[in-house]
Image (cartoon, helix red, strand yellow):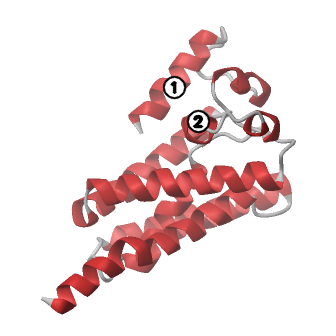
Amino acid sequence: MVIAGLAWLFVADELGLSMFQQQKSSLLLQVGAVNGKTLGDGQIWRLLTSQFLHVNFLHMVFNLIGIYLLASAIERTAGTTRLAVIYVVGGTIGQSASVLLRPELVSSGASQALMALCGFTLLAYRRLSLPRYAVFCCAAILAMQVALDLYVSGAIKPGHSFGFMAGLASVALLLFPRLQAEHDA
């Protein structure tokens, strides 16, 4: 979360923009965003760095608030390592889907990772006894994200849906071994 905020300030300074000015996707390619060409050139590292870059200040703030609310709940019950895996893997899968399905577009932002946190929360909240507010936050985040996607693009963005599915899948990968160990004990 802090990294995305610092990245916003760095990019604004690096590109000579004011702090609240929109950061154009084409300019974000200079500092770590990803598209089909950069990925095709073997710059795989951009799948990670692009998750900390944002075009719009308010969109970044929305992502960071959602991440804070969900990540703090997940970290308390699932631990820091599991949280990091969900965030990074879910975000990377989402960014990969965005680039592979829409290679002409520049992909950036933490929405894919946020969607992974939502998917994980909705499937794991009972098992992990996550606070009730986390489920309500997920519902609000998902509703707003779907509405924004439909308004802006006319369809749900691939990165968002694949990020969400990665979050759902992470429940099986991260919790089932734990459940089996508890059962065997």
**Neighbour tally class for label 2: few under 14, some 14-19, many 20 plus, Cα within 10 Å:** some
The amino acid type, in three-letter code, at marker 1 is Ala
Q: Nearer the viewer, residue 104 or 123?
A: 104
> What residue is at 78 percent from the left and 53 percent from the top?
100
Residue 52: tell me if it is visible: yes
> What residue is at 68 percent from the left and 52 percent from the top?
96
**What's the mark number on residue 25?**
none
Q: At numbered mark 2, what does the secondary structure look like: helix, strand or loop? A: loop
The residue that label 2 is drawn on is 45
Q: Is residue 140 left or right of residue 178?
A: right
How far apart in space, not on screen, are marks 1 and 2 (Cα)?
Answer: 16 Å
The residue that label 1 is drawn on is 7
Q: Earlier in the sequence, mark 1 or mark 2?
A: 1
- Quadrant into which the C terminus falls: bottom left
**Neighbour tally class for label 1: few under 14, some 14-19, many 20 plus, Cα within 10 Å:** some
> What residue is at 42 percent from the left and 73 percent from the top?
173
Residue 69: tell me if it is visible: no
Residue 74 placement (x, y as % from top left): 32, 62
Q: Nearer the viewer, mark 1 or mark 2?
A: 2
